[in-house]
Amino acid sequence: MGRFKPTVVFDFDGVINSYTSGFKGIDNIPDPPVDGISEAIHDIRKAGYKAVVVSTRCVEDKGIEAVKKYLESHNIVVDDVVTHKPPAMVYIDDRAICFDGDPGKLLSQIQNFKPWNK
Ligand SMILES: [Mg+2]
C-alpha cells in the first residue's frame, strides 16, 4: 500500500509554460517553460507530493495532446494532466490572489492585479 500523496495543482499557462506571448490557440504553445520549473516539480514530487497540471486547454483532445507533448519535450514529469482543478493541498496559479482572511482588501487586490509575466 502506497503512502498518501497530497496533491499540488499546477496551472499550465503562466506557471509551467512562460506564456509570454499570451494565448495563440488551444494546441499552439510557442513559449519556453518558466526557468527552473522542471527541476522544481521534480523536487516537489520527490518530496512526496503528487503533481497535477490543470489547463482549460484540456477541454479538447488536441489541447491535452499539446500540453502532454510540451511537458514531454521539456522533460517535465507530472502525475496527471486534467481540465478542472481537483481537490488539492495547494494550488499554484499565476492568476490568483492568496486570500489572507481580510475580505476588505479584495477589491483593490483585484483592481491592482497583474500576473508576473505582464
Ligand atoms: Mg495561468
Image (tube, rainbow, N blue to C red):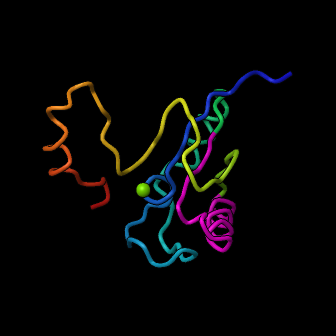
User: Residue 62 location, x and y as percent?
Assistant: 66, 74
Ligand 1 shown in quarter? bottom left
Q: Is residue 60 above or below residue 41?
A: below
Q: Which residues are magenta?
A: 51-74
What secondary structure characterizes most of the magenta part? helix
- 72 lies left or right of 14: right
Picture residue at 59% right of the left edge, 56% below the top: 83
Indicate the quadrant where residue 98 lies. top left
**Viewer-proximal residue among 41 and 66:** 66
Q: Is residue 51 above or below residue 30?
A: above
User: Residue 60 location, x and y as percent?
Assistant: 63, 70
Q: Residue furthest right?
A: 1
User: Residue 87 location, x and y as percent?
Assistant: 57, 36
Picture residue at 67% right of the left edge, 47% below the top: 78
Q: Is residue 105 above or below residue 72?
A: above
User: Residue 55 location, x and y as percent?
Assistant: 54, 58
Classify the position of the C terminus by image quarter.
bottom left
Q: Look at the image and say whether residue 57 sits in the magenta stretch.
A: yes
**Viewer-proximal residue among 47 and 25:** 25
